[in-house]
Amino acid sequence: MTLKIDQVYKNFGEKVAVDNLNMTVQQGEVMGLIGQNGAGKTTTFRMILGFIGADQGQITWQNEPITQKLKQKIGFLPEERGLYQKMTVEDQILYFAELHGMKRPDARLKLQDWLKRLEVVGKASDKVQTLSKGNAQKIQFIATLIHEPEFLILDEPFTGLDPVNTELLRNEIKRSRDNGAAVIFSNHNMSDVELLSDHLLMLKDGKTILQGTVQSIRESYGRTRIYLESEVPTEELLRLPGVEKIEKKGTGRSVKISEASVGREIFQSVTRDGYVQAFVQSPPSLDEIFRMEVAEKNAENGGRNK
């Protein structure tokens, strides 16, 4: 079971929204789709679902065009939440479940289990409008997954949730992945993307600028970040060739270096007395990479964020 996007292009007037996009999402795999607002993420989701058509290229699921019948096997959580406020939680969930081919008794039984797993505060008989924002978001999430979709599209699934509830939803996404679902999701929190994604694709102005596993993308930037806990003064470290920037980070310092080989000199300097509390040399985080790419884009645009 594979989603394949092959040389897809979409424009709106003079604006190119998606430019020659190629992507494959396999069964049991999570694909993180990232980029600034307007990069083409939501347009991609809408083309997959057939809400808008691609101008060029093909989108297939299991080597077939995505028909209305295949859409019943898809779970879609849009960025713009869309619950019926005056319906009860149960009526809402059962309605969406039936749209995806479930029988009401089966959906009603599964709903009780979902409410417990996601720790929803409230009852199935409560109206949606009485729920807190976080609990309403959980209900929308349940409506997306209750029919056990083979393919999940999640547009900003964790927006507005605290870390505990984010973890609850993240675990359910992993459960779906482990049960064989293909998952594609977008998120602005790079930590969430890094924790959840098997593969990653970054769009900039509709173009693919990064693609691969999270670790391979990070490693491609070199091990140019050092986390350090040491008594050696910052001024001394800054005098070492290749040390570009030092910032306080928790109980230690984050050292940015020009190339990975500089790490050896720093290690020798901070361990000259035979002991250092912490020394970790690693590639930049996904968040740092995202910021670097955005900064490069803004520089190309003369500082204007388009």
Image: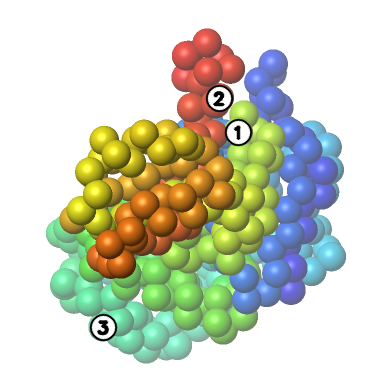
Q: Are marks 2 and 1 in contact (CB under 8 Å)?
A: yes
Residue 165 visible to an observer of this rendering: no
Helix, strand or loop for disc 3: helix
Picture quadrant where residue 142 is located: bottom left
Quadrant where the image shows the N terminus: bottom right
Q: Earlier in the sequence, mark 2 or mark 3?
A: 3
Identify the residue position indicated by label 1 in the image: 204
Amino acid carrying label 3: it is: Lys
Q: Label 1 crowding class (10 Å Cα cut-off): few <14, some 14-19, many 20+?
A: many
Identify the residue position indicated by label 2 in the image: 297
Identify the residue position indicated by label 3 in the image: 116
Helix, strand or loop for disc 2: helix
User: x%, y% of residue 6?
Assistant: 82, 49
Q: What is the residue that sits farthest to the top in this orientation?
A: 302
Amino acid carrying label 2: it is: Lys
Amino acid carrying label 1: it is: Lys
Picture quadrant where residue 53 is located: top right
Query: Label 2 vs label 1: CA separation?
Result: 8 Å
